[in-house]
């Protein structure tokens, strides 16, 4: 099958696809069944340097652009695997890279690049505020040369498999700020040994194998040196990282969509019912063709968003549209693939039901479809703000 858009970074794509051959369906099924962290897979990716592609060479990474990272994640998902266990190791460090001091970058980035330090926990969402990030309640109170953190985060993925967390907390009460986007600050929280100092992590079991957790802070001390950027400006720093995250997650969705299309196509060729392959029926062909067209269209937007991001131009609209279109294309392809497989789509051994569950996440996280639509309505189309 010709793949019109997945032609950038061909060497990286081939090498990642080769690496993924060692982690086939049976590996992912076992991880999923046991809700186990895919340590071997993450180690292989780390050792191959793929999680450090966005870190500049001066700090031990390969200094490549976002489209290289997107190609890596797309290939992992296209192989039938899932990068959610470690994708955040690629981009969470962006907050330190863009807004940290030289000393902070030197202290952390080389070890993140080598994998000696894992920075893949991102604590923003809270149970009571949800999508309304400006209403978070976790506080960081300055006390001499440290901050004391109190509060709770939810859906903090990979917290048990991370040494550091980028945390967003309130440093000025909401009713005391001049602008509503101020008063929040970003901290690099060292979680090593912190469970004895006021940090509690509780896993949340979900419909997918995602290593996600809820995290409680009870007077956790964080040195002032671990404040990233200026106090009170944290919301801006978090937003600036979100475009990269959306483009990369969109690339994973493309990989999922391509896996569903390839899997459905080959099943439709082979499965014979009424003395002919089911793929001979247009009722089977057309949904596959439609999913393919939607995926190719989404891929163009993902590529466009990545190129604008790499050119350091504003890409909020494109990053959001890439995420929206790719997540929808993946879900359309997932539904089509399951239907094409009939009853066998429900059998664990075909991997369709696992990928179906996994790809559903991306219409909710890291940003839900409605919030993307309201962004486009307000910021691109100039419609009145709805919330
Ligand atoms: C598996 C998983 C992993 C995650 N990992 C992380 C992580 O590592 N770090 C982190 O900080 N967060 C993480 N999240 C949280 C994720 O970003 C949020 O779940 C998501 O942003 C939605 O927030 P919510 O669940 O509180 O939904 P809510 O804000 O309660 O919204 C519920 C529904 O209402 C809709 N809605 C809300 N307000 C509006 C409105 N004004 N207009 C129209 N519709 C609206 C939403 O679109 C959504 O469909 C994760 C979530 C999951 C499920």
Image: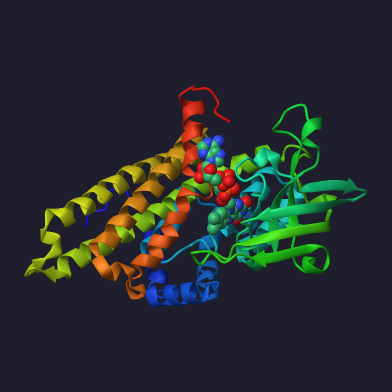
- Res 308 seen here: no
Instruction: From the viewer's perspective, tell me whether residue 385 is left or right of residue 253.
Output: right
Horizontal relation, residue 214 to residue 343: left or right: right
Q: Quadrant of the C terminus?
A: top right
Q: Residue lying farthest right?
A: 144
- The residue depicted at 38 percent of the width and 40 percent of the height is 301
Percent x, y for residue 228?
A: 74, 46
Where is residue 35? Give x, y as percent.
Answer: 53, 73
Task: Mark yes or no: residue 164 visible.
Answer: yes
In front of the other: 284 or 252? 284
Tell me residue 241's x, y (percent).
59, 44
Q: Quadrant location of the N terminus?
A: bottom left
| Residue nearest the viewer, comparing 79 with 372 | 372
Is 249 located above or below residue 371 in the figure?
below
Q: Is residue 188 above or below residue 352?
A: above
* Color scheme of the displayed model: rainbow
The reply, left or right, for residue 231 in relation to residue 340 is right
Residue 130 lies left or right of residue 332; in this view the side is right
Number of marks drawn: 0
Q: What residue is drawn where x is 69% and y is 33%?
A: 181
Taking the spot 67% from the left edge, 50% from the top edge, the residue there is 126
- Where residue 120 sits, quadrant-wise, is bottom right
Point out residue 239 in the picture as x, y percentages from the top left corner. Answer: 61, 40
Question: What residue is rendered at 59% in x and 59% in y?
Answer: 89
Hey, which residue is sitting farthest left in the picture? 275
């Amino acid at each position: 099958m010709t793949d019109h858009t997945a032609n950038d970074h061909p060497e990286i794509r081939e090498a990642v696809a080769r690496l993924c051959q060692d982690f086939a369906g049976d590996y992912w099924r076992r991880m999923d069944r046991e809700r186990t962290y895919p340590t071997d897979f993450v180690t292989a990716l780390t050792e191959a340097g793929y999680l450090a592609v966005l870190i500049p060479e001066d700090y031990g990474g390969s200094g490549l652009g976002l489209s290289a990272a997107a190609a890596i994640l797309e290939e992992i998902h296209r192989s039938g695997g899932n990068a959610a266990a470690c994708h955040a190791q690629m981009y969470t460090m962006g907050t330190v890279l863009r807004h940290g001091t030289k000393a902070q970058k030197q202290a952390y980035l080389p070890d993140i690049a080598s994998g000696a330090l894992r920075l893949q926990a991102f604590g923003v969402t809270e149970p009571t505020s949800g999508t309304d990030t400006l209403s978070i309640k976790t506080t960081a109170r300055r006390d001499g040369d440290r901050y004391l953190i109190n509060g709770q985060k939810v859906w903090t993925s990979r917290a048990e498999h991370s040494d550091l967390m980028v945390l967003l907390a309130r440093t000025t009460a909401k009713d005391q700020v001049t602008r509503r986007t101020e008063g929040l600050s970003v901290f690099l929280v060292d979680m090593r040994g912190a469970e004895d100092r006021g940090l509690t992590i509780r896993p949340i079991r979900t419909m997918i194998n995602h290593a996600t957790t809820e995290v409680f802070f009870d007077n956790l001390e964080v040195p002032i040196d671990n404040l990233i950027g200026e106090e009170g400006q944290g919301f801006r720093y978090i937003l600036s990282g979100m475009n990269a995250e959306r483009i990369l997650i969109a690339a994973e969705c493309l990989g999922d969509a391509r896996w569903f299309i390839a899997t459905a196509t080959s099943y439709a060729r082979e499965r014979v019912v009424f003395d002919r392959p089911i793929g001979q029926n247009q009722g089977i062909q057309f949904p596959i063709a439609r999913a393919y067209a939607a995926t190719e269209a989404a891929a163009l937007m993902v590529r466009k968003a990545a190129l604008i991001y790499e050119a350091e131009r504003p890409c909020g609209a494109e990053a959001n549209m890439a995420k929206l279109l790719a997540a929808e294309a993946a879900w359309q392809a997932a539904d089509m693939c399951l239907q094409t497989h009939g009853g066998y789509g429900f059998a664990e051994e075909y991997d369709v039901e696992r990928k179906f569950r996994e790809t559903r996440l991306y219409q909710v996280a890291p940003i839900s479809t409605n919030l993307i639509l309201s962004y486009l309505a307000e910021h691109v189309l100039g419609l009145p703000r709805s919330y």
